Image (cartoon, coloured by chain):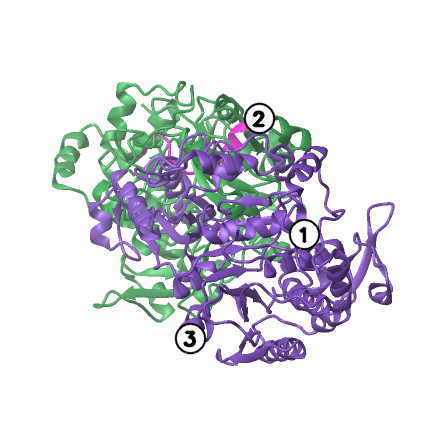
Chain colours: A purple, B green
Amino acid sequence: MKNLSRRSLSFSLTAACAAAVMLCSASLQAAEVSVAQTSAAAKGTFREWTEVLAIPNDSIVAADIQRNTAWFEQAFQRRGFRTRQLANDGKPMLFAELPGNKAGATTVLFYAHLDGQAVTPSEWQQESPWKPTLKQRNAAGQWEALPIEQLYGANPNPEWRLFGRAAADDKAPIMMMLAAFDALKASGATPSVNVKIILDAEEEKGSPSLGKVIDQNQALLKADLLVVLDGPMHASNLPTLVFGNRGVAQATLKVFGPRQDSHSGHYGNYAANPAQTMARLLASMKDDDGRVTVAGYYDAVKLDDESRRVMRAVPDDEAALRKRLGIAQAEKVGQNYQEAMQYPSLNVRGMQAADVGPKARTIVPGEAIAELDLRTVPETDPQVLLGLLKAHIEKQGFHLVNGKPTDEERARYPKLAALDYARVSASSMAVRTDLASPIGKWLRSAFVKTYGKEPVQIRMMGGTVPTGAMVGALKIPFVIVPLVNADNNQHSANENMRLGNYIDGVQSLTGILTEPFPAK
Amino acid sequence: MKNLSRRSLSFSLTAACAAAVMLCSASLQAAEVSVAQTSAAAKGTFREWTEVLAIPNDSIVAADIQRNTAWFEQAFQRRGFRTRQLANDGKPMLFAELPGNKAGATTVLFYAHLDGQAVTPSEWQQESPWKPTLKQRNAAGQWEALPIEQLYGANPNPEWRLFGRAAADDKAPIMMMLAAFDALKASGATPSVNVKIILDAEEEKGSPSLGKVIDQNQALLKADLLVVLDGPMHASNLPTLVFGNRGVAQATLKVFGPRQDSHSGHYGNYAANPAQTMARLLASMKDDDGRVTVAGYYDAVKLDDESRRVMRAVPDDEAALRKRLGIAQAEKVGQNYQEAMQYPSLNVRGMQAADVGPKARTIVPGEAIAELDLRTVPETDPQVLLGLLKAHIEKQGFHLVNGKPTDEERARYPKLAALDYARVSASSMAVRTDLASPIGKWLRSAFVKTYGKEPVQIRMMGGTVPTGAMVGALKIPFVIVPLVNADNNQHSANENMRLGNYIDGVQSLTGILTEPFPAK
């Protein structure tokens, strides 16, 4: 029994979109599961959700990870999944697979992570980050607690939120997946694709061993496509697909002055100040519009008209973004926010020479340090970018040393610097899937059927998530499908999940699971 | 009875100088006191010297200052001085005056300070900084202790040194002054000028109340000339006169980025990085040769040929200086080290944006701070220099705010900065006496008669000493006459005074005291 699943979205649709929906609806393939069924299934998992949120999941504590893995293992087993804990030095990851996967059908590996960010309990406005707390915003705009029993009632308000560490990031998508299978079962539907699931146990630590665990379980994890259930939806709270993420490389730049901090009276105007020299060097790396001037830095990035169109279509409210950031104007790297994220960045994430504030002394500092991060893009290997940076520094007249300069180097070279960096790990590599790829078409089609309109499509997000580790190990196309509200405070205190987004997320997942691949 | 006082200097004279001495000697006025008498008088004070060095003198402890002031008061009284303790909030300064000062004669106020730098006893290679310890350098170049009784023997080696806090800075010159009066008495000579002495009690804390104490005792301290007995001699260890010192002004420069530290992935290439913006701003303030490019910064400094000749004549070993600093080349502010010190400096004494090292995070920092110090010169008021700096920053397109920018300022101005500075106190002002002034001629003449050659003349030293507080309050010409070895570790652990310099200092002071003013 097929039901047309368009419904009154709890996220807002504009009048213009509504018209588009009318036009599209004639050609919509109806999804397998009704809104009532997905909504009921979502609510049916709220009690389990609060149960698993009570288990701490900072992966620094192996025993806590083991409890989470065991809990999710049982939750998947209750729904008929075959499971296996994947050994990972005391912090097991979880693999789950639906029996009855058909040979020859497309296999989709869904990724999510069961670990969470560390917490500072004193910063939380509730008894504990591990005591899930239902809250509503009062007339004054403050969050006030509601009895948790109201979460389990018949009609929880979609605007209510459940607060707790990992309430959103990233236990919510796992719970939504469990609910989506409950909805399928309730409606008698089966997935259109073979389903495999992997739950990472150390994502918040940068997934240091994910690549290795995948390599050790290649046969088990073999799949055609990867769907990453992580990260926040677009700020508009509209259904979102993310086709890539920038990578990140780090480097430490030091500029050397006198051998030791020296009296600024006796040597000011004589011994060059390394903070000043650092300033000149950094200034040489970017123009006044924020564009990197290191030769060749942007060369490999080519944006075609279709990519530009997709980026323009993202409903970013840049005026609101600038207001939130507190900046009058953006750098001019791209024509808009999305376009800026398609280029590698060169960012001074920290800088120091001697001391500031009450500890400042009247000295010429002995050295200046700039910590750099380079957000990288798939077009240019991070080692190439770091090489361009190194060449640029040398072109400015610097002699680069390893560690500290020797006396001989000090006597010989007027400008001394050091640039230290390590090889970038797979989990920090930039990855991107073509917007026009089959996986993109498949997911777009599922969302159009579910919501009657195209999702927000992010060509490449600016931040770095460890997709690279999986893509590097599995060598399959991927898309990130974020399902949690953008304002969920992930990584901070008072993390929360909006109930409406949870319910919508279950519907998104049932839409995806019932969408045939390749998309018709 | 007059004796020609030229003698074998314990500091080295070159052969060239020796020839000059022969030429000069015909016109030399013989000084009043023989080398044998000054030397005997110097040695005669060694026991008192060790006695007073045993009294701690960090001015943070008022009771210790009181003990030092009382000790010196008695020492001056024993030599027939009239004394008065000058009230200073529990940390009395000492005034001493020889009776028999002649009305109408030139009155010279000698300044020294009885307080010392704070100590970290664990850093000292002796039982205590307050247990004066006689040491000699052994064959391996290490300092090894000698029995203190050897200091009081007939022939202490001029290369021996007495270690202890304030052994040099600045109790030695006070002791030398006491010894000089002993030498005058022994030889039946009297000073050629009226003598007044003031001993500061808080010099190492920046003489915060010296100006006030002088103002409260103007009649008592009234004098025609000021001789400051402080600081180290030229590194060559040759007799030295210092005609001025740079002042110091401080400013805190902040550049504002996003309202708070922001994710470098999501906002790198979008929100301008304040560390980068700071780098561009600082880079705009100086050229690659280290010359300040702020308009008008150097305008008032005019160096005439005679000043340049005097500066060239200073026997600086710049190759050795650069080697010690560990720099291949000096900035090109002046043609030599001395000339560089005649210009105001603009120094980044500290700089910070977010964190470096293990605490560094991948963020666009919310702000960057540069702590600046400006070494100032008498030609340009520090407020004028700070005003030029402010104008320069505005010319680079920055809107300057007070404190933090408001939301409205953030929305309006792409470049936001703050420049905070306080009015410069008198003790931090630059002061300089003309090389050709009567006090200069007088002291040069005394040194030529004593040593047979011109002293090293420092037109203006690069550092800041609180001469400005006295000159501002007394409005009389001054010269600094440093008498302690340059390598005395003043302000550090293991401060020491070379005995040869102590003995020479007594001779320098007797030469000055017996030199008629105005110089013939």
State the separation of the CA atoms marked 1 and 2: 37 Å
Q: Are marks 3 and 1 on the same chain?
A: yes
Q: Report whether A221 appears left or right of B60.
A: left
Q: Quadrant of the N terminus of chain A?
A: bottom right
Q: Tag 1's secondary structure?
A: loop
> For mark 3, does the 10 Å Cα neighbourhood hold few (<14), some (14 to 19), or many (20 or more) residues?
few
Viewer-closest of A385 and A443? A443
Q: Which mark is residue A485?
A: 1
- For the residue pair B405 and B236, the one nearer the viewer reads as B405
Q: Nearer the viewer, residue A511 or A328?
A: A511
SS for callout 3 = helix
Residue type at mark 3: give it. Ala
Residue B185 as seen in the image, left or right of residue B457: right
The span from disc 2 to disc 3 (Cα, nearest Å) is 61 Å
Tell me if A379 is positioned left or right of B423 in this view. Answer: left
Label 2: element kind? strand
Inspect the magenta stretch and tell me whether residue B38 lies in it. no
* Chain under disc 1: A
Q: Position of residue B514 (x, y in %)?
A: 36, 35
| Image mark 3: chain | A
Question: Residue B57 appears at what percent x and percent y?
Answer: 54, 55
Q: Is residue B432 above or below residue A79?
A: above
Amino acid at dot 2: His
Q: Nearer the viewer, mark 1 or mark 2?
A: 1
Specify start and end residues of the magenta stretch as a single range: B456-475
Between marks 3 and 1 in the image, the one whose residue lies nearer the viewer: 3
- Tag of residue A219: 3
Q: CA distance from mark 3 to mark 1?
A: 35 Å
Q: Earlier in the sequence, mark 3 or mark 1?
A: 3
For disc 2, the marked residue is B399
Residue contact at pointers 3 and 1, CB within 8 angstroms: no
